Image (cartoon, helix red, strand yellow):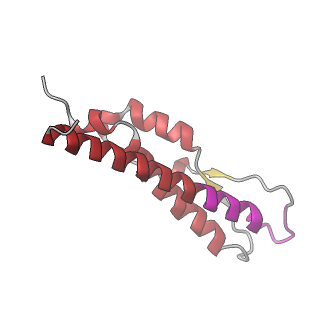
């Protein structure tokens, strides 16, 4: 019985796809910082990853309707819920988490390559 690439790489490809989608959502929030009535959105990364792993046979499909609205700490007069500091912090943390996932995936691929070449 052989090992599938999905089993070998584990959660990391799905995590990268979700991190990339979260980057897009957070960038949209930052771009609309001064748009009246804009509602900041985000995803629940853990729940989305858990759902992706439970339904792994279907592949990862992010449904943008599952993005949640962020509740502001200090609501603005114009109805915009983007808080620049919060969004920048979330964006930076997501970038670090993306890099971490990418590093883990690279380590997995290097390990597989070493095993295939008999270096392990």
Left or right: where 104 falls relative to 66: left
Tell me, yes or no, if residue 13 can be seen here. Answer: no
Q: Where is residue 56 shown, x and y percent of the image?
A: 34, 35
Residue at image coords 41%, 38%: 52
Left or right: where 73 falls relative to 14: right
Instruction: Say if 114 sits above or below 37 in the image.
Output: above
Q: Where is residue 97 shown, x and y percent of the image?
A: 54, 51
Left or right: where 48 falls relative to 88: left
Instruction: Say if 118 sits above or below 88 in the image.
Output: above
Residue at image coords 68%, 65%: 88
For this orientation, the residue located farthest to the top is: 1
Tell me, yes or no, if residue 48 can be seen here. Answer: yes
Residue at image coords 66%, 57%: 90
Left or right: where 30 falls relative to 13: right
Segment colored magenta: 75-93
The answer to which quarter of the image holds residue 3 is top left
């Amino acid at each position: 019985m052989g090992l599938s690439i999905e089993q070998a790489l584990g959660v990391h490809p799905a995590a990268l796809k979700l991190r990339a989608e979260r980057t897009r959502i957070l960038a949209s929030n930052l771009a609309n910082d001064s748009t009246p009535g804009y509602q900041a959105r985000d995803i629940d990364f853990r729940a989305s990853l858990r759902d992706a792993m439970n339904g792994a046979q279907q592949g990862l499909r992010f449904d943008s309707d599952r993005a949640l609205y962020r509740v502001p700490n200090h609501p603005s007069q114009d109805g915009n819920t983007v808080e620049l500091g919060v969004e920048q912090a979330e964006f930076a943390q997501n970038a670090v988490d993306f890099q971490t996932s990418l590093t883990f995936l690279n380590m997995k691929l290097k390990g597989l390559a070493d095993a295939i070449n008999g270096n392990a």
